[in-house]
Each structure stands twice: as C-alpha cells, then as structure tokens.
Image (cartoon, rainbow, N blue to C red):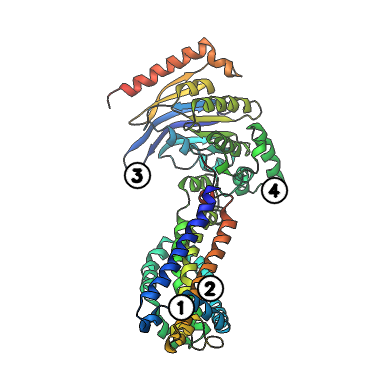
Amino acid sequence: MPAPPFVEFRMVEKRFGAGNLVLANVSFLAERGDFISLIGPSGCGKSTLLRLLAGLSPISAGTLTINGKTPDNSAADLAFVFQEPTLLPWLTVAGNIEVPQKLRGVSAQARAQSVRQVLDLVRLSAKADAYPRQLSGGQKMRVSLARALALTPKLLLLDEPFGALDEMTREHLNEELLAIRQHQMWTAFFVTHSVSEAVFLSNRIMIMSAEPGRIHQEITVPLPYPRTAETRISPAYHEWVSLVTGIVRSLEKQPL
Amino acid sequence: MRHSSLTVLLPAAFGAGVLLLWYGVHACLDPEMRFLLPTPDAVGQAFWTQRASLIRATFNTLQGALIGFALAIVVSSGLALLLALSPLVRTTLYPYLMALQMTPLPVLAPICVIWVGAGLLSVSLLTFVIAFFPLVVNTTQGLISADRNLVEMFTLYRASRTQQLFMLRVPAALPYFFTGLRIAATLAPIGAVVADMNAGSSAGNGGGLGFQAVIYSSQAKYPALFATAGTTCILGFALNAAVLGVAWFMLHHWHDSYDRTDR
C-alpha cells in the first residue's frame, strides 16, 4: 500500500460568515518534502489557505488532513513564519527563538541546544544576545525563520516572509532556506507575490485566481535541487519564470 | 558635546534670569507690599531656620505619599488584570472609575476624615485615590493592546491563557504601566499635600507639608511658606526621578523610546 499523502485538500471551501466565499473547491495532495508556492492576485485566498493549514481558521466544507489528522490535531507538527518578523521586543534573539518551544513545554536544556543549532543554520550565532531593535530587517526575518526551524517541524508554513525585504537580501534568504532544507526535511507551503521567488524555491507552484479564490493551475518546476545562486543564471530558470509570469499576468488582466 | 553642554547652560541661564526678575519685581513693589514676594535669599534663610519642621513635615508627607502610591500600584495592577481579561467587567466598571477620578480631592478629604479620622491613614487613602486612576487606565490599555501579530503567534502555538498573559501581555504592558506610574508619581505628592491640608492635622507628629503650609500662612511666615512650596516641588521631583530610574532599568535594553542610536 502506498504511503498516504502528507497533506490532503478535498473539496475544501472557506467562507467568512454566512456568505463571502473566499476559497472554493480546493483539492490537491502534497507529498512529504514538497515545496509548494502559492501565488496569485490579492484576494485569491492564498494566505487564507495557509491559515486553514495552521488551524488558525476552520474550513467551511470539505476535508483537510495533515498526516491523516485535522489541522487542529496536527498543531504540534507545524511551524509558521509570518509576514512580519513578530519578535517579542523585550526578549533577546535566543529568548525569542525559545518562545514556541516554551509554549510546548520543551525542557530548558533541549531549548538551549536547538537555539545554538538554528542560529548556526541562519548564520546569526554572534547575535544570540542581541535585542530585536539592534537587528536589520533581514536579520529579524532570519530570527523569525530560526524560531520556526527550532521546532523541527514536519510542515513549514511561510506567509510572504521575505516580501518586505530588498531584492538582494531576499535572494540570499531564498538560497539559505534551500540550503537549510538539506539539513532539515519539511514540507513547505510558501505564499509569495514574486514569481522568481516561487520558481527558485519550489517544486510545485499553485497559481491561484480570485473571486472566489481557487487553484487556477498547478505548475511543476522540474529544475533539479540543490538550487543555488548558479540556478538563477540558467536559461531553464528564466524560461520557467517567464512562463509562470505569463499565466499570473493573464489572471490579473481578466476583467473583474 | 555641544548638545550636552547646552542642556546644562540653557536652563542655568534661564534660572539666573528668573532670579534677577524676582529681585527686580521685589524691588519695584511698594515696600509695604514686599511681603507678597519674599526675596530668594529670604526664602533660602527660611529653608535653613525652618529646616527641622520642614524635614519632619517632608518625612510625614513622604510616608503618606509612598503608602498611597504603593497601595495604588498593587490594587491597580490587580484590577487592570481583571479589566483586561474580561470585557464585561471593563464595560461595567469603567464609568465608575471615571466618576471616581472626576471627584476633586478637597471634596473627598473631609469624607475620608469622617470615615477614618485625620492623619496618616487619611492622607495615604487620598493619595491612593489620586494615583490609582492613571495607573489602572494605562496598565489596562497596555494589557489589551498587545501587538495583534504577536497574539496570533501565541494562538498558533496553542498558548494557554496564562502563558499568553504572562509571556506576552504583561511584558507588553510594562511601557504603559510606567507611563501611568510617571503620572501617578507627579500626582501622588500633590495628592498627599492637598490631603494633608484637609486631613493631616494629626499625621505623624505635627502633620506634613500641606499642614505646615497652612500653619505658616496663618502665622504670616511668608518666606517659610515659599520654602514649603519649594520643598514640595523637590519632593515631587525626587519621586519622579525615582520612577524614571526604575523605568529606565526595566525598559532601556529593549524599548524604542530609549534607543539613542541615529538611523
């Protein structure tokens, strides 16, 4: 018998209140180790889809399972990286990374060890005792990422985490994220507005359309991993970027 | 350097100007009316000759102010927690808290004297009443206005109510609490002195600064009256400086308002 899919969306619907359909008929499977980007015009429900997975918001119809469990019961398997760094300003970098683990009752010793490991992964070991206000935007986002990674999640949800950063920093962090994936294996759902980011990171891209939000088209990106800075200058990468850009543009141009 | 020397020089020059003006006004007054504005040196002299009474009165006022202040911190923190946790309690109690704040202290003072008698207890209670309101309002505001994104993160990681309160809301409320504390520290000595004027006749041995002011006024010891005003001012200043010091100690390493780096 084949292993069951890691994440299963079957005819998932999301409404806010009585009317207002935000997501309609979302059905797809995600395998372990998939890196899935969600891209589409604003209002297409991509962030909502992430919130459903996180159990922050209940589905209105259909079924959604993670590892065979409902999102509510699989909370222990997931970590979330928000759009903003969402760091507690009164805690040091190390203190911030420990917060979710503290909430989950991880022992102090295990916390200290994982803090060292993840700070190493995001190359911020020297900043363990710094306060958030002493960090740059890119460094804060790295801390936020480290905080999620410290949970060694099975499912990593990222809601436009690098959207507010400049192009250079964003590209560096994209490369780091994939490098970290060599050490920690998780399934990722990544919301973004940037086609090049989606193509660079993911093996699958869900292009979504709005009103109501639904999956318009799925694209499989066959570029081999590991992808590095080299990948960005390969012709194949550029072909995929222009292909996906074309589809996304066509969706935005449609009259509302 | 230029900046820091200016911050000393400018106020000093202004102070010197005020002193000159003070002497000037005194000299211009009709000699029979000069008692209205004793010269700075006469006030200084009164400070010295009345030092025993002033120190004793300061100690009595300080005692009342500190007891009331401490009581206000304890009770307001508890009430703020309750108000923050329950919107229902908040809606129910807020109008009455406002009403309490609107009632002037000189009116409350005689009522307080009827209930508990004149003296330290009255002064402490009245100081408590005046210091309590800014504390409870600011702390409650701080507890309910934790960053929405941070609250969402705590929800996502399934934080319990207690965890959310003590790991997120209480630390997030600290800057608000200290804002309230600074206002309370300004009001507490004023409250103590006003209360003392009304209800302080048997506070300690001979009352506090408010009572002392009443006595000097009735005895027409005007320079001493000015010295009493100055002492009250110093007391308030000291209490404020103490609160600022504690706030700095608690917040300077993380709160933006203490960030001195130029960006």
Which of disc 3 and disc 4 is earlier in sequence? Answer: 3
Cα separation between marks 4 and 3 = 42 Å
**Mark 4 is on which residue type?**
Ala
Mark 4, mark 3: which one is toward the viewer?
4
User: Label 3 is found on which chain of the structure?
Assistant: A
Callout 1 and callout 3 share a chain: no
As drawn, A57 above or below A256:
below
Considering the image in quadrants, where does the N terminus of chain A appear? top right
Residue under label 4: A108
Mark 1, mark 3: which one is toward the viewer?
1
For label 2, the SS is helix
Badge 2 density bin: few <14, some 14–19, many ≥20, Cα 10 Å: some
Considering the image in quadrants, where does the C terminus of chain A appear? top left
Cα separation between marks 3 and 2 = 47 Å
Callout 4 and callout 3 share a chain: yes
Residue under label 1: B226
**Mark 3 is on which residue type?**
Gly
Which of disc 1 and disc 2 is earlier in sequence? Answer: 2
Cα separation between marks 2 and 1 = 30 Å
Cα separation between marks 1 and 3 = 67 Å
User: Label 1 is found on which chain of the structure?
Assistant: B
Mark 2, mark 1: which one is toward the viewer?
1
**Mark 2 is on which residue type?**
Leu
Residue under label 2: B71
Task: Please provide percent x and percent y for residue B90.
Answer: 41, 64
For label 1, the SS is helix
Is residue A215 something that shows in the picture?
yes
Based on the displayed image, in which of its 4 quarters is residue A44 positioned?
Answer: top left
Based on the displayed image, in which of its 4 quarters is residue B95 positioned?
Answer: bottom left
Residue under label 3: A17
